[in-house]
Amino acid sequence: HPHSDYADKALDKLDAMTDHSTLSGYEAPAATLYNLGIKHFKGGSLKKSGEYFRRLAKNYKKSTLYDDACLMLGRIAIRQGKLPLAEKYFHQTIGLKRDSRPEAMFYLALTYAYQDSPRAAIVQLSNLAVSFPNSSVAPEALFYSGQYYKNLGDLDNALITWEKLVDSYPNSELLADSLWLIGNTYYKQSKYLEAYNNFNKAGNLSPEKASDRLIFWTGKAAEKLDQRDNAIAAYKMTISRYDHSYYAYRAREELGKFGIHLEAKTVPAVPDTVGK
């Protein structure tokens, strides 16, 4: 039971026995130290978590968990605001060239960003996305790269990066947020057709993968294009899929402007998709 409180107590007892030479030379298994470190990290006890990961890193340099321990020490340092130390651990993890390398590159990029070096963060994230496209953090690398480009005022590269995420990782949890950022950027540039085409992709997604915000703004973009029927369809879909949400209430207000007044408990029937 490595995640239970008794695992900590058992290890403390073994340590005490070691100190009194009952078990001279004993060291807890690397996996035990790692699991306890993760447990305390998730529980918010960074000091205790760090103790386990430092112990692992010190005594098990040949373990397959050594790079994971270095990575976690870096993540702890970030949470503690010790950014130079975090940078050191992430560089160390990357240098080991093991399975944790992509995650270390990702967190190193975040460390750069936290130190007001967004361009350095973008370089690191771009290298990650190119070198490890199948890693679990590749979609996040593209998402954050786009955010940093946007913060720098480089909207063209922000759009290119988010669009790559949408095209390359259609099952990512970041899909809806990426579609929103792309569409919102086009909308603010008065490129309403591009905004509409992007927002409208949400209509082909399941309600769980899409969002009320995306479908509502499909309607707003359709209005800018004088596509009355498509706007109405989008507002009705917003209500049908996400009734009682913020954007569902806004959709009811927009329908009212078209002379369509729905009672509070009425959910309109809608087509499966909004017009192309």
Image (cartoon, rainbow, N blue to C red):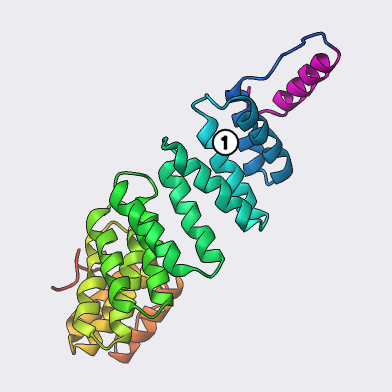
Asked if residue 66 lies left or right of residue 97, the reply is: right
Residue 217 at x, y percent in the picture: 32, 77
Residue 231 at x, y percent in the picture: 24, 81
Quadrant in the picture for residue 27: top right
Asked if residue 8 lies left or right of residue 159, the reply is: right
Q: Amino acid at mark 1?
A: Ala
Q: Residues within 10 Å of mark 1 (few under 14, many from 20)?
A: many
The residue singled out by tag 1 in the image is: 69
Residue placed at 67% from the left, 28% from the top? 4
Residue 69 at x, y percent in the picture: 57, 36
Residue 129 at x, y percent in the picture: 32, 53
Please tell me whether residue 159 belongs to the stretch shown in magenta: no
The relative height of residue 184 versus residue 125 in the rendered view (above or below) is below
Residue placed at 25% from the left, 78% from the top? 195
Q: Nearer the viewer, residue 7 or 82?
A: 82
Residue placed at 23% from the left, 84% from the top? 192
* One can see residue 238 in this view: no
Magenta stretch: dominant secondary structure: helix
The relative height of residue 27 versus residue 72 in the rendered view (above or below) is above
Residue placed at 52% from the left, 24% from the top? 62
* One can see residue 164 in this view: yes
Q: Nearer the viewer, residue 10 or 135?
A: 135
* Segment tinted magenta in the rendering: 1-20
